[in-house]
Amino acid sequence: MDETSQAIEMLLSVSRDGRQRLGTQIETQLRGAIREGRLRAGARVPSTRDLACQLGVSRRVVVEAYAQLAAEGYLTLRQGARPCVAETVRGRVLSSPGAGVPAATPRFDLRPRTPDVSAFPRSQWLRCLRDALRTMTNAEFGYGDPRGAEALRSALAEYLGRVRGVAAVPERMIITNGYSQGQGIVCRALAARGARRIGFENPSHPEQRRVAERAGLEIVPIAVDQAGVRLDELERADVDALVLTPAHQHPTGAVLTGERRRGLLTWLRRRDAIVIEDDYDAEYRYDRAAVGALHGLEPDRIVYAGSASKTLAPALRLGWLVVPARLLAAVTDEKDLADCGTASVEQHAFATFLARGELDRHLRRMRGRYRSRRDLLLDELARALPEATVRGVAAGLHATVELPEDYDEHAILDQARRRGVTLMTMRDFWIPPGTGAPTLLLGYAQIPIPAIPTAVLALTDAIRSTRQR
C-alpha cells in the first residue's frame, strides 16, 4: 500500500448507523479532502477494490462513489490505470473557511460544450511541441506570414483533402485562434466588400450570431428541418452570405441531404453569394462514414472553417479557414489586424502531430469512447423516458432529445438544476420568435460511463416532477 492509500485510509470512515448512504459518505469525505487541499491534483487514490476492502463495503459502493466524483470533476478515471485527483481541481482549494468559495459544481454536466479533455494525448503533444522547439529556425520565431506557418497549412491541406474532401491548397489557408475568430474575420471582410445581410440556420449557436452582428451584418434566420436548411426560405431571404453546418447541423443533428446540397449550390451560383461552412462535428459519425465537405463542390464560393476545439481541446485555440481567391487578401488583412498571427510554436507542433498520424489515432480512440457513451445514454433514456424521441443522426458530442408538447423546458431546467444536473435545451439556440417541441440537448463527451445511468435517473426525476406540478 503506498503513502497516499494509507493517508486516505486515515481520512475515510463509514458508519452503517449514519443517515447518509455508504457511497454518499465516501463521496462527501473525499470531496472535502480534495477541496481543502489534503489531496492534491494528480494524487493517486486507491483502486475501487482496495478501498472497498479497507472500508469493509462492497466494491459497487466505491465504484458508484468514484463515478460520481469523476462526473463532478474531482477524480480522473481511466481504464487500466489507478484513479487520481483530477488536474482541474488545481488552484481551486479553499484558502480558509468561507473565503473565496467557488460556485457549486453540478453533479452531472450534460451541456454540449467541450470534448473529453481528460483524454487529450498529452505525451504525444509534448513530443511534437519539443520537436517544434528543436527544429524551428530563428526566422520562424518572428511574426511570419499572417496566414500562418507554411508547415501547418501544408499539413492541414493534405489532411482535409484526404479526410473531408476539401479542395485545399496551402496558399488559400489561414490559421486562426479557433472557429469564432475565423468566422469573425470573414464576416468583417464580407462587410467591407458591401455585404449587409447574412443567413443563419434557425436554430443555431447564439455566439456565432453575435460575432456576425459585431461585424455589422444583419442576421436573417433560415429554418432547418430533418433534411437541413430549407431552400424555400433561403430563396426568400435576400442574403449575401450564409453560415451553414451541413455535415451535422448544430444543434438539431440533421445532415444536409444530397437534394438540398444540389439546390444550395444552384442558389449559391445564381446569387453569387458566399457560404461559411462550419464543419462542426464532422469527425464524429458513429453509424457510417461522414458526408464529405461542401467545399470540394464549390471552392470559389465556400469558405471552409474548422478547428481543433472538438477534436482535441479548446485550450489549443487552433482553427483554420480555406478561403476563395477573391476573399483571400481581405481575410488575410483582417487576420493580420486582429493579432499579427496565431502562436507559431503551437502551429509547428500541430503540423508534426498531423504528419505523424497522431490526430487520426486520437480520433479513432475517441469515436469508440463517444459511441459507447452515446449508446448507453440512449439505452438508459429509452428505459427511463420512453416518450422521448431522439432526433438527428448518430454523430457528434450530444444527443437531441425531443419531448411531448406538454413538457416545459424552463421548468425542466429548473428542476434538473435542483438535482445537480446541468444541461441545455433548444430554446438556447432559437432565433426569436423560433419555436418547436420541447427539446433537450444532452452532451455525453464529459460524463464517464459509470455515471450515465445515475445521471439519466436524476434527469428523468426532474422531468417527471414538472408533470406533477
Image (cartoon, rainbow, N blue to C red):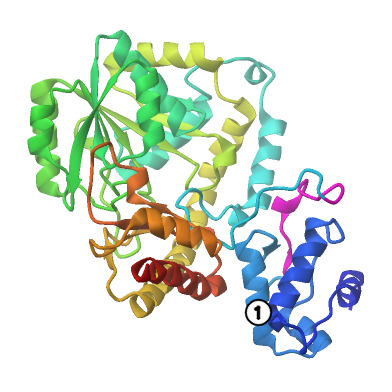
Tell me where the magenta segment starts and ends, as one range: 82-97
Percent coordinates x, y for residue 150 in the rendering = 50, 25
Q: Which quarter of the figure is the C terminus placed in? A: bottom left
View extreme (front): residue:
469
Position of 145 with respect to 161 (left or right) is right
Foreground pick, 293 / 192: 192
Image height of 76 relative to 251, above or below: below
**Residue at 78%, 46% in the rendered image:** 91
Q: Quadrant of residue 20?
A: bottom right
Percent coordinates x, y for residue 41 in the rendering = 78, 55
Majority secondary structure of magenta residues: loop
Residue holding disc 1: 63
**Amino acid on which disc 1 is placed:** Val
Image height of 5 relative to 99, above or below: below
Foreground pick, 12 / 146: 12
Position of 97 with respect to 190 (left or right) is right
